[in-house]
């Protein structure tokens, strides 16, 4: 993998290259597999190098974004790539569908595919879930703040977001704007975090994934405070991931400040940082480079 210098470009490359959370589902809308993303990345790699040489346009676009949520950041990365892609033309983005005063939903991207001459509807999302109990079941994967769940998100994408263009009223509304959608696709990426008890089972981690999940997906682990204290000695250094580092790993030389285990305990006990806390581990072993630290009672209550 090319080691891009700028974090925004590293995140952009991750957005394109990283594996999906879900692949191979039986659905009329495409859920591209890992190979599709890898091909797109290989095609875009030389362009990414030119962006890395001067990322000012990308950084200005990201800085101008008023909505600072990670999902919007991810969408903006995709918009930047699509707006420069030789294969696609962005027809519209973030299309609010309001008919007779009723808001029916939003379409992330409407694209024109220059190679097939078809109009595409793409939904783009990035999510992070922590697994509990039987991790082979989708409803056992929760957002760290317990406000979201993998099965609910996938169902919403399948049954609502990706098919909104098939609603007769919406199709007529789009037709009035000169748009007829030929195909749709769901771009759902992110990372799953397994219980720390499975940390020694990395070679067989795909056996404890939901069947709908991509076998190549990115993953990490979550720990309760007591597990964290037992798992790490005083040597490893940690980077709290607050506003960056959720997508591509932050290189050691780019870190603002690293924390020891004792530092981390102090920041949590003093409520400078709150749980759940996403942490990057420096000098990690295998996939243990990202962990979520949670309260002892998680997931019984919101920490």
Image: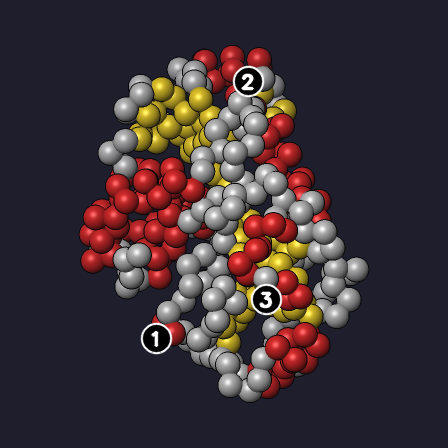
Secondary structure at badge 1 equals: helix
Could you tell me which quadrant the N terminus lies in?
bottom left
* Residue topped by disc 3: 200
The answer to the question of whether label 2 and label 3 lie on touching residues, with beta carbons closer than 8 A, is no
Could you tell me which quadrant the C terminus lies in?
bottom right
Secondary structure at badge 3 equals: loop
Image point (31%, 38%), residue name: 83
* Residue topped by disc 1: 253
Image point (39%, 52%), residue name: 14
Residue 268 x/y as whole percent: 64, 77
> Which quarter of the figure has residue 223?
bottom right
Image point (49%, 33%), residue name: 31
Secondary structure at badge 2 equals: helix
Residue 252 x/y as whole percent: 38, 74
> Which quarter of the figure has residue 110?
top left
Say whether disc 3 or disc 1 marks the residue closer to the N-terminus.
Answer: 3
> How dense is the environment of label 2, judged by Cα within 10 Å: few (below 14), some, or many (20 and up)?
few
Say whether disc 2 or disc 3 marks the residue closer to the N-terminus.
Answer: 2
Nearer to us: label 2 or label 3: 3
Numbered mark located on residue 166 in the image: 2
Q: 127 left or right of 13? A: right
> How dense is the environment of label 1, judged by Cα within 10 Å: few (below 14), some, or many (20 and up)?
few
| Residue 16 versus residue 270 in the image, above or below | above
For the residues marked 2 and 3, what is the alpha-carbon distance in whole angstroms? 46 Å
| Residue 93 versus residue 13 in the image, above or below | above
């Amino acid at each position: 993998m090319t080691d891009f210098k700028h974090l925004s470009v590293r995140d952009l490359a991750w957005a394109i290259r990283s594996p999906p959370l879900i692949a191979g589902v039986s659905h009329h809308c495409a859920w591209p597999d890992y190979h599709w993303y890898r091909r797109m990345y290989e095609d875009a790699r030389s362009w990414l190098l030119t962006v890395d040489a001067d990322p000012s346009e990308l950084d200005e676009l990201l800085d101008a974004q008023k909505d600072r949520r990670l999902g919007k950041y991810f969408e903006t990365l995709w918009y930047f790539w699509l707006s420069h892609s030789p294969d696609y033309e962005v027809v519209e983005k973030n299309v609010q569908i309001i008919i007779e005063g009723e808001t029916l939903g939003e379409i992330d991207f409407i694209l024109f595919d220059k190679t097939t001459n078809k109009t595409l509807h793409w939904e783009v999302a990035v999510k992070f879930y922590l697994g509990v109990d039987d991790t082979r079941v989708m409803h056992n994967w929760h957002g760290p703040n317990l406000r979201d769940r993998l099965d609910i998100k996938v169902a919403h994408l399948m049954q609502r977001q990706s098919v909104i263009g098939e609603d007769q009223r919406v199709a007529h509304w789009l037709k009035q704007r000169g748009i007829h959608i030929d195909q749709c696709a769901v771009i759902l990426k992110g990372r799953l975090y397994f219980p720390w008890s499975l940390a020694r089972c990395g070679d067989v981690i795909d056996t404890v994934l939901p069947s709908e999940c991509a076998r190549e997906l990115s993953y990490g682990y979550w720990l309760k405070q007591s597990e964290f204290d037992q798992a790490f000695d005083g040597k490893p250094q940690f980077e709290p991931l607050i506003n960056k580092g959720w997508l591509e790993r932050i290189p050691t030389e780019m870190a603002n400040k690293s924390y020891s285990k004792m530092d981390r305990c102090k920041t949590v006990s003093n409520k400078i940082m709150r749980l759940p806390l996403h942490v990057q581990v420096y000098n990690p072993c295998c996939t243990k480079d990202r962990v979520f630290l949670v309260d002892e009672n998680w997931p019984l209550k919101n920490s």
